[in-house]
């Protein structure tokens, strides 16, 4: 069996007048995140980790933000396509561990819904998806509530 790891990182700044979508789940909050797509920072980090593990470049390369196709797109569709790209190379997902870093809002109440949603999108067990939420202890741009960052590591395997 061939095992590979991948790492992904993403960040988006807050913007008024947009829904806040994290991990495929709408979180009730007065601000959303700015981006060409729905700016789902966690899903983007997971996509990048998966693509990196399979050496398939990154999310911007595969789904360019210059393309009208991806304007305001539901990022879980990009995640679905990413899993397809991996399958074409013979890889399936072992497990995912991720951290979302946000000063506000509190994300812990939404984590189980995110894990469930992402398990449906990727067709894997929700037990293979870990999502952790932390703050930046009021330091830096996350601490100043300017935006949200997300980090993900994945393990993928091929027989
Ligand atoms: Zn992004």
Image (spheres, rainbow, N blue to C red):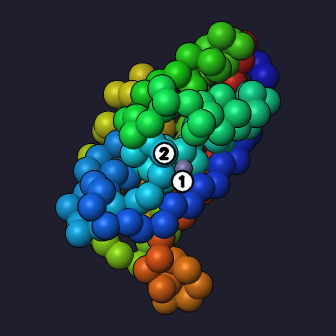
Instruction: Determine whether 20 is above or below 7 in the image.
Output: below
Q: Could you tell me which secondary element the residue under label 1 belongs to?
A: strand
Instruction: Determine whether 135 is above or below 14 in the image.
Output: below
From the image, tell me which residue sits under label 2.
36
In the rendered image, which quarter is residue 20 located in? bottom left
Gap between marks 1 and 2 measured at Cα = 22 Å
Q: Furthest residue to the left?
A: 28
Question: Residue 104 placed where, x, y %?
Answer: 35, 76
Give the position of the N terminus as an image quadrant. Answer: top right
- The numbered mark at residue 152 is none
Residue 94 can be seen in this image: no
- The numbered mark at residue 98 is 1
Q: Could you tell me which secondary element the residue under label 2 belongs to?
A: loop
In the rendered image, which quarter is residue 151 located in? bottom right
Residue at the image position 39 percent from the left and 45 percent from the top: 38
Residue at the image position 48 percent from the left and 45 percent from the top: 36
Instruction: Please state which of residues 72 and 91 is positioned toward the viewer in this rendering.
Output: 72
Residue at the image position 48 percent from the left and 85 percent from the top: 144
- Decide if ligand 1 comes within 8 Å of the CB at mark 1: no
Q: Looking at the image, is mark 1 or mark 2 earlier in the sequence? A: 2
In the rendered image, which quarter is residue 30 located in? bottom left
On the rendered structure, is 75 left or right of 55?
left
């Amino acid at each position: 069996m061939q095992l590979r790891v991948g790492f992904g990182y993403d960040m988006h700044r807050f913007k008024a007048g947009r829904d806040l979508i994290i991990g495929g789940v709408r979180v009730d909050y007065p601000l959303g995140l700015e981006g060409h797509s729905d700016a789902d920072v966690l899903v983007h980090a997971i996509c990048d980790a998966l693509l990196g593990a399979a050496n398939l470049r990154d999310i911007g390369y595969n789904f360019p933000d210059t393309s009208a196709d991806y304007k305001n797109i539901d990022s879980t569709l990009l995640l679905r396509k990413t899993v397809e790209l991996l399958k074409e190379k013979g890889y399936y997902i072992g497990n995912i561990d991720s951290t979302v870093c946000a000063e506000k809002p509190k994300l812990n109440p939404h984590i189980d819904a995110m894990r469930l949603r992402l398990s449906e999108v990727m067709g894997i067990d929700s037990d293979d998806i870990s999502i952790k939420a932390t703050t930046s202890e009021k330091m830096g741009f996350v601490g100043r509530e300017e935006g949200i960052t997300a980090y993900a590591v994945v393990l993928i395997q091929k027989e």
